[in-house]
Structures are given as structure tokens and as C-alpha cells.
Image: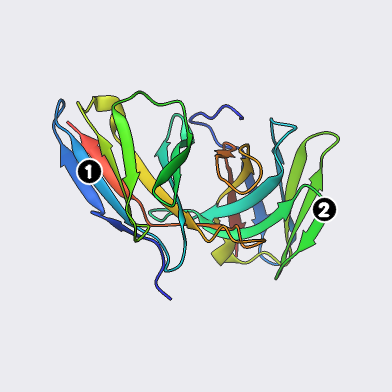
Amino acid sequence: KAGVTQTPRYLIKTRGQQVTLSCSPISGHRSVSWYQQTPGQGLQFLFEYFSETQRNKGNFPGRFSGRQFSNSRSEMNVSTLELGDSALYLCASSLMTGLRTEAFFGQGTRLTVV
Amino acid sequence: GESVGLHLPTLSVQEGDNSIINCAYSNSASDYFIWYKQESGKGPQFIIDIRSNMDKRQGQRVTVLLNKTVKHLSLQIAATQPGDSAVYFCAENEAGGSNYKLTFGKGTLLTVNP
């Protein structure tokens, strides 16, 4: 069974640009969450989607947005990139059925803003 | 959640010893907890989870203990192996119920000496 797939793995962008990251969850998983990981702040929750609806949101500015498609694939977008947005962006998927609520992470997308 | 910074707590053990990694969580309303292992260049890997209606759960070579009174979580690894070397994170689900908003601890760097 394929795991969580994130694309691209690496990305370099210039300040002011925007970026879109993609996440394909494990087949059958309906919940997709996004996290930002930096050395200074650690792992921080961005948002969670379930059945195309955002259910939870972390404390990030409106420049960070996301969406989920009917096949559960998800994208996150960051507009007007800042140097501080350089981070590893991680996606996690979960079955969210009954007791099966484990969240499994992808390898992440390493975003560098220059 | 816990504040995170550049300096991770570290634990160094000899191969074959048992390891205990501790974590203090912040939200008394959190009802679901997960331990993750993260190796360099990879996304967090699910190890074991526990719900708030339990105080102990065992997996293969791992045991998680939950003390809700003092909001403390621990991960015990039996017969630690060099392949266990990684950063270990605890995470609490502050959303409650069947949706996600994981808050991660700062992580502990485990080094296993052969």
C-alpha cells in the first residue's frame, strides 16, 4: 500500500512569489493535515481537511491556504512568500474511521525562499 | 503546546539498554496522543498511540504510558538498537473527537551507541 506522497520534494522560490504544494494521502484516507517544520519552531499545525472541508486551522497568516479535492488529494498554497516561510512542509493523512485514527506523514516538501 | 527551540533534549544509551523518553503536554482536554520517530531527511514515522481512557499501551518493543494527572507521556523502548537513533516527538490532539489538530512537543534526540 502506497504511503503519503508529497510533491515536489524540493522547491526554491523567490520572495514575493507564491507556491503550491501537493499531497496524495494513503488510499482510503479522508483526513489530510498540513504542518510546517522549522528548526526554531518545530512542528506546527497549519490546517486539516476532511471531505473537502477545512475542519481545523492553526495560527498562521492568511497567506497560507489549502484545499482538498473529492479524491482526498490536498494542496496548500503560500502567497507572497517571505524568507521565514523556508521550512519543511509535511502532510499527514488519517483514515478517521472509528478507532483507526493514526496519522501517517509523507516525506515532506523542502521549501527554500531566497 | 510546548515551546520549541533550537536545543533538543538528548538521550544517549548503549545498544541493548532500555530507553525512556518523556514528554509533558499542555492541554488537559487533549484526548489522543501519538509518538513519532523522525530520522534525518524523512517525515515523522508513526510509532504508537494512546487514548485518554487508557494509561498504558504496548507495541512491539515500545510502551507508552500516560499520566493525565500530571499531563505526562512517556515512551519506553526495550532493547534499544542503533536503528532507533532518531528524534522522537510526542503529539497531542487538541481538537478532540474525530478531527485533528496535533500539537507537537519539541522532540528528544535519541542516540544509540553500539
Asked whether disc 2 touches disc 1, contact meaning CB atoms under 8 Å apart, the reply is no
Q: Nearer the viewer, residue B29 or A49?
A: A49
Name the amino acid, label 2.
Met
Residue at the disc numbered 2: B54
Q: CA distance from mark 2 to mark 1?
A: 40 Å
Depicted B81 relative to depicted B70: above or below:
below
Q: Secondary structure at mark 1?
A: strand
Depicted B16 relative to depicted B69: above or below:
below
Q: Residues within 10 Å of mark 2 (few under 14, many from 20)?
A: some
Q: Quadrant of the N terminus of chain A?
A: bottom left
Depicted B5 relative to depicted B72: above or below:
above
**In the image, is A49 to the left or to the right of B45?**
left
Residue at the disc numbered 1: A20
| Residue that lies at the very extreme toward the right in this rendered image | B69
**In the image, is B17 to the left or to the right of B9?**
right
Q: Quadrant of residue B59?
A: bottom right
Q: Residue at x 75, y 32 (%)?
A: B28
Q: Residue at x 17, y 41 (%)?
A: A12
Q: Position of residue A47 (x, y in %)?
A: 44, 38
Q: Secondary structure at mark 2?
A: loop
